[in-house]
Image (cartoon, rainbow, N blue to C red):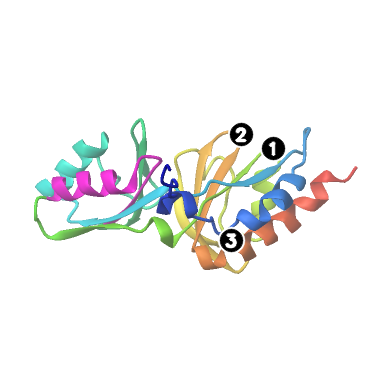
Amino acid sequence: MAEPIMAGPAALRTSPLAHLEERMRAAAVTGTRGVTLAELPFLTMVNVRVDPASAAADRIGRTLGAPLPRRCGDTAASTHRTAVWLGPDEWLVISRADADIVTAELREALQGAPGSVVDVSANRTTLELSGPSAREVLEKGCPLDLHPRVFGPGHAVSTTVGPIAALLWQTDDTPTYRLLPRSSFADYLARWLIDAMTEYGRP
């Protein structure tokens, strides 16, 4: 008799917004006023702290395939990874690669120098808001100037949307935005965005 196949921990995960998947899909608006909302669950996120002027920072940049960004709002992307500036000596590395592999590679690059590399993937989830009306939806509750002359693809900053703190990252000119709230606040933010999208589906 064959032994039953046991599901691994990854197969048992439930994302913070799995229960809202259908509501987000139903809220989608098409056409010239279109806007869509979806969760991108289980992205790898690794927090990196290191002196930006150190040899360790250079090694981490080579491991990532792009130098760590040096200014507020900047990101640095390679084929599979993006480093987002969080502070003068702090970055968030976002990837679809396995968290254990990314964390191990960055720790190896640190080589024991002062700093830290910590897997924080479970700390946040990712919402993707996209479409011609995406900027207008965000402007209902985000204090930032999101006009393309100021905020464009590759720009990422910590801000608030409605009452929720989140990392806001614009990924393309559609425009498409990724919002990274703490997992415990993701439900509120998703419902806020769904409500803000409603008027764009009306004639």
Mark found first going from the N terminus, 3 or 2: 3
Q: Position of residue 156 (x, y in %)?
A: 45, 49
Counting the numbered discs, the total is 3
Q: Position of residue 61 (x, y in %)?
A: 22, 40
Determine whether, in the image, residue 124 is placed left or right of residue 66.
right
Residue placed under numbered mark 1 in the picture? 132
> Circle 1 — which element?
loop
Determine whether, in the image, residue 72 is placed left or right of residue 42.
left
Task: Tell me the distance, in whole angstroms, between the alpha carbons under discs 3 and 2.
Answer: 21 Å
Q: For the point 36% across and 59% down, which residue is it?
A: 120
- What amino acid type should be assigned to the residue bearing mark 1? Pro
- What amino acid type should be assigned to the residue bearing mark 3? Pro
Q: For the point 10% across and 46% down, which residue is it?
A: 55
Residue placed under numbered mark 2 in the picture? 174
Is residue 154 visible from the viewing direction of this image?
A: yes
> Which residue is at the front of the view, 1 or 171?
1
Mark found first going from the N terminus, 3 or 1: 1
- What amino acid type should be assigned to the residue bearing mark 2? Thr
Quarter of the image where the N terminus is located: top left
Mark 3 vs mark 1, foreground winner is: 1
Is residue 140 visible from the viewing direction of this image?
A: no
Task: Tell me the distance, in whole angstroms, between the alpha carbons under discs 1 and 2.
Answer: 6 Å
> Circle 3 — which element?
loop
The magenta stretch spans residue 108: yes
The boundaries of the magenta stretch are: 90-110
Task: Tell me the distance, in whole angstroms, between the alpha carbons under discs 3 and 1.
Answer: 19 Å
Residue placed under numbered mark 3 in the picture? 143
